[in-house]
Image (cartoon, rainbow, N blue to C red):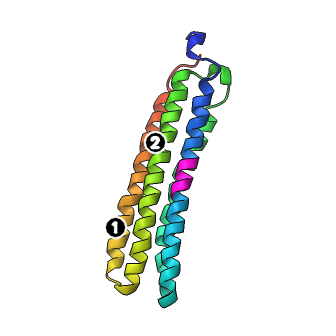
């Protein structure tokens, strides 16, 4: 490859991909945790025995951040030598980071809203618990889709020849 394919700024895009992966997914996880946590706190005033059962949305929101961490670490491990880091690889890593980060942000929002309403509703009607869990699983899968796309991008980007 020529040096035109490995400009000095190409690693910037990879670093921004790693940053986007962890920052956006952590924002989603934080929102999901905070929103679900307020629902748990409000519900536990009347039904304190349901606190441990209602912690599931908080755990699921935390998993979203793990997805972003995994992709950020994979991207960061690709920075062995900045002189051989191609512009193509930088764009691939940016796409991978944005994929997992933004889908994690959306999943965190969904988990937070469903978790808040779900634990409050379950406190009043225990039959809602299974439905809440199913909806939370579907919300969590949104983040998993972003992780899968990011892993595919990262794997395919690694197969490209270096500069």
Q: Residues within 10 Å of mark 1 (few under 14, many from 20)?
A: few
Relative image position of residue 29 (x, y in whole percent) = 53, 59
Q: Nearer the viewer, residue 63 or 158?
A: 63
Which label was assigned to residue 134? 1
Magenta segment: does it hold 3? no
Instruction: Determine the residue located farthest toward the top in the rendered image.
Output: 2
Residue drawn at x 41%, y 84% is 123
80 relative to 20, above or below: above
Q: In the rendered view, does 85 fall on the left or right side of 145?
A: right
Residue 156 x/y as whole percent: 46, 30
x 55%, y 37%: residue: 17
Q: Can residue 51 be seen in this view?
A: no
Which residue is label 2 attached to?
99
3 versus 35 height, above or below: above
For this rendering, which residue is in front, 123 or 75? 123
Mark found first going from the N terminus, 1 or 2: 2
* Image height of 135 relative to 155, above or below: below
- Mark 1 or 2: in front is 2
Q: What element carries label 2?
A: helix
> Where in the figure is residue 97, as x and y percent of width and height?
52, 40
Q: Where is residue 86, by image quadrant?
A: top right
Residue 82 appearing in the image:
yes
Binning the other alpha carbons within 10 Å of mark 2 as few (below 14), some (14 to 19) or many (20 upward) gives: many
Helix, strand or loop at label 1? It is: helix
What is the spatial separation of the Cα atoms under label 1 and label 2, in whole angstroms? 24 Å
User: Horizontal placement of 95 versus 127: left or right?
Assistant: right
Q: How many labels does the image show?
A: 2
Tell me where the magenta segment starts and ends, as one range. Answer: 23-28
x and y percent of residue 65 in the render? 55, 55
The prevailing secondary structure element of the residues shown in magenta is helix
- Which residue is at a point 48% across and 90% down the rendered structure image? 46
**Quick one: quadrant of the C terminus?**
top right
């Amino acid at each position: 490859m020529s040096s035109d394919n490995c400009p000095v700024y190409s690693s910037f895009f990879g670093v921004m991909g790693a940053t986007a992966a962890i920052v956006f997914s952590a924002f989603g996880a934080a929102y999901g945790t905070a929103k679900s946590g307020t629902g748990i706190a409000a519900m536990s005033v009347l039904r304190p025995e349901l606190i441990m059962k209602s912690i599931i949305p908080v755990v699921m929101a935390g998993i979203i951040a793990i997805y972003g961490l995994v992709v950020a670490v994979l991207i960061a491990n690709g920075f062995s030598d900045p002189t051989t880091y191609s512009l193509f690889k930088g764009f691939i890593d940016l796409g991978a980071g944005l994929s997992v980060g933004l889908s994690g942000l959306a999943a965190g929002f969904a988990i937070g809203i469903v978790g808040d309403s779900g634990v409050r509703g379950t406190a009043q009607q225990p039959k809602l618990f299974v439905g809440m869990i199913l909806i939370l699983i579907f919300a969590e899968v949104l983040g998993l889709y972003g992780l899968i796309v990011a892993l595919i991008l990262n794997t395919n980007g690694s197969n490209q020849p270096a500069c």
